[in-house]
Each structure stands twice: as C-alpha cells, then as structure tokens.
Amino acid sequence: MEESFGDLKKGQKNCQRTVHCHVPCQGYFAPQKIEEALEILSKYGKEIKIIAGGTDLLVQYYDRLYEINHWLDLKNIQELKEINITQDEMEIGAMVTHTQLETSEDIKKYYPVLSQAAADIGSPQIRNRGTVGGNIVNASPAGDLLAPLMAYNAQFRLLSTTQEEKLVSAEEFFIGPKKTILEPAQLLTQIILPLPSERTYGSWIKIGKRKALIIAAITLALVVEMAEDHKTVKDVRTCLGSVAPTPIEIKEVKKKMAGKNFNQLDFKQLGQIVEDKISPIDDIRGTREYRKDVAKKIMIKALEEIDESMRGEEVI
Amino acid sequence: MSKLNIELTINGKKRKVETTTSTRLLDLIRDDLHLTGTKEGCGKGECGACTVIMNGELAASCLILAPQADGAAITTIEGIGDDKYLDPIQEAFIETGAVQCGFCTPGMILAAKKLLEENPHPDEEEIKRGISGNLCRCTGYQKIIDAIKLAANRLSSSDSGRGKKDA
C-alpha cells in the first residue's frame, strides 16, 4: 500500500523486545474503560508509563523516550474527561484539559481561581493537551493548578488495581518536589471539590518573567469565604506554589482572619505573615529574598482584589 | 520501543502509518510523511515551530507521541491554502513582511488560523494571546500582529463571498 510508511521491514515481528513483553506486543495501550486501564496497570506496574496529555512527560523524556517500553494512554477513557456537578461537589476527571478548566462555565462560576490559573498555564498548545491529572501527578512545586486546588479543598480519588478507592486531600498527596503518595498500582481518576458557598471570593496571582510559557516564580491562590452577614470572615485558604517543595497553605493567615470583620483587616500585616512563613529557595526563577518580598506584595494585592469584588457586589 | 500501526487523517487524507512507541508526532509528520513544513525548534513545547491543528485544537507536535495521534485529524501548514491559492492569512503574512527566515511561519499561520476561526475580530491583546505559544526570533511580532489584523479584515469583508464559493 502506497500510503503505508515506516521503516519496518516485511516479516519483522511486531515487537523487538522479548524481555518485558509477549509477542504480539505493541507496547502501547489506550483502553476505553478505567477497569481495563487498571488491569493493564496491575500487569505491568512500574514497567508502564501512564500518559495523559504528555506535555510534561515528553519534556522530561525528551532525549530518552526509547527508555519507556510500555505506555498506558488514558485518552480514550471518556469518564476521565468529564466535569460533573453532584449535589454538593464538583467532580473533575483527571483527563480534563487546562483549556476545559479555563472555558467551563461551571468552573468559572464556582472556582474562578482554578479557571484563571488554568488560563495562565503555558500556551494554547499546552493548555489544549495538558491535563489537570497530569499537573497533579507530576507534582512540580511550580505546578500552576496545585495551589488553587488546595485552596478549594480538593480531594483526589485514587483507584488501585484491586479496585480499592481512596480519597486523599491535596495536603496529604504531595510529599516533595515531584513526589506524591501515588503508588505504581494506583490511578488518579477524579478531583473532587466541595461546592463553595455563594459568599466565596478568590484571587489568583502568578508571577513569572513573561506571560506565556513560564514556570512560575511564585503563585498565590487566596480563597475567602464570608459568613452569612457578608462582613465577617468565615474561612480562608492561603495557598502558594513555587515557594516550598510542595504547594503549601499558610494556616496562620486563617487564624488571623477568621471571625474578623473583613473591613478591619490589616492587609500589610497579613502580607507580612505570608512573607515570614514561607522559606523559598534561590533558583533560576528568583532568589529567596525576591520571592519573600513578592509573596508579601501579592498577598496584599490579592486581599485588595477580594475587597474590591466584595464592594462591587455591594453597589449592585 | 515497539512498532505499531496507526491511522490518522492528515490534511484531509487518511493515512495508515507504521510507527514506534517512541516516535513523536513531529517526527512522524516530517520523517515518515515527508511534510517538512512543520519545524522542530526547541523540542520542548516552548517555541511553537512544530504547531499543528489536532482535532480542531492547536497542539505542539513535539509533545505528542505518534500513537497518541491514532485516529486524530491533523492539519499541518501543507493543509492551508493550495497550489493555486494561498490562504488569506498566508497572503497577509507576505504583504505585511511578517516572514523573514520563515522558521516560525508555519506555526504562526496555524495559530492565526485557529485564532481567527474562533474569534474573527480579535483585538491586539487577543492576537498576542493567540500566538503566545509561538516564538519568532527575527521579524519581531509587530508585523505578525499586523498580518493577522489584515487577514481578519479581509476574511470578514469577504466572508459571504468565500462562503458561497466554497458551498
């Protein structure tokens, strides 16, 4: 056939390797069901690489793709690509792309900080392919979605090859740079976010040297829930990325803000708390000193933004 | 690395291709399909020279494994315009001097194509965001932005005419 290409000589077997696979083996699995994916995963364990969008993985393995003998591609599993609202939760499939997060009306409405963070990732090319599950599992300290997910109290649904289901919080999940508690026999299937109350406000700030395709020097996801009187702060989540081995929450901010009247808060003092409580490192994206200084300033800016959006509502 | 067969539609044509599990879509397009308009710049998704339209979305073909594209519909720069008529975006790039060395041009034109499909009247900020995944190291961006504006104007003024001709 004229339109058949490739360098395989006629008669050559499908698989060159005999160590890990059984002929006929194609080394590439793209199942349609989660159960099938788990079955494949249980068979190959550490020997198989799970691929979602591939936007981090192919960079990581840029010059050594040949090292990977088996791939498990999740692209055909429809239920991993969906965003669904249940009674009081939002379920985001692990294969939902950044573009989907950016454009979904539900995400914009309930989790604007997450939607804005998705819009700030990479470039159109990256957002169209990269996924929320990939961003989580890759666990880069600079992963743009991680601080927002933590700020919205995200839980991750992990399914094991024995079909055991486990829900873990973002805090539990990330244990170091590129390190998580995910086991080789587990698959991240969904991200579960509680639906926030209508009195929830958020602000997202990402600092980097340029707007597109930048790995963040620092990110801040601030989510403030007000009490029913619309004046008293009920709950606060101050989460930052790129300032520690994992995304972190500054819990001291919550202690200072909860139960207080928002109008009487000292934004500068709160900014100082953030600066004092983080201990970032020097790297090519910024020095420790710079990051601490900027952390304070963006905290103040985020509080001002939330203040403004609350005032905006009062006028209406 | 294992061999496998995939099927994909490239520029409207169905192709069956034998590939491997460690071949990138970019390599498949260039080396196996000999469509060399798609370029490799950084190989890490940062420069946009390898941009294609995959299933209606912009994608960096250097960050896609060939088997990931199994069943996909892909448009490369060779699928824009034809031997007789250039696409209005291509014409606009030539007229405004938006092409110098030409290495970023295929990716830029595909990004512009996608942008104008979704948003026929983009403002300057929207154009910048639309091509934010594509680097140009010689012409500079101003002429490219001018070209996209010119193409947008032409496309919108000739909308009805073109539509009828195609139908």
Image (cartoon, rainbow, N blue to C red):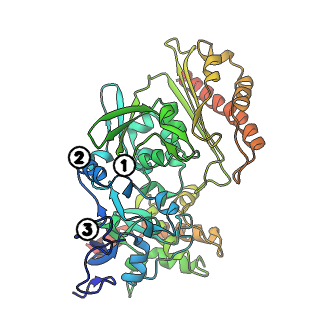
Residue visible at 39% across and 77% down in the picture? B29
Where residue A191 sits: x, y (%)? 39, 37
Q: Is residue A191 left or right of residue A64?
A: left
Amino acid on which disc 1 is placed: Met
Q: Is residue A190 above or below residue B160?
A: above
What kind of element bears circle 1? loop
CA distance for labels 2 and 3: 20 Å
Q: Is residue A113 visible?
A: no
Pick whichever of labels 2 and 3 is earlier in the sequence: 3
Disc on res. A25: 3
How many neighbours does mark 2 have within 10 angstroms: few (below 14), some (14-19), or many (20 or more)?
some
Depth check: give the residue in front, A213 or A141: A141
Where residue A267 sits: x, y (%)? 71, 24
How many neighbours does mark 3 have within 10 angstroms: few (below 14), some (14-19), or many (20 or more)?
some
Amino acid on which disc 3 is placed: Cys
Where residue B8 sits: x, y (%)? 28, 72
Where residue B144 sits: x, y (%)? 58, 70
Q: Is residue A273 above or below residue B139?
A: above
Which residue is under mark 2? A35
Which residue is under mark 1? A95
CA distance for labels 1 and 2: 16 Å
* Image quarter of the N terminus of chain A: bottom left
Q: Is residue B8 above or below residue B94?
A: above
How many neighbours does mark 1 have within 10 angstroms: few (below 14), some (14-19), or many (20 or more)?
many
Residue visible at 50% across and 71% down in the picture? B107
Q: Chain of mark 1?
A: A
Q: Chain of mark 3?
A: A
Q: Chain of mark 2?
A: A
What kind of element bears circle 2? helix
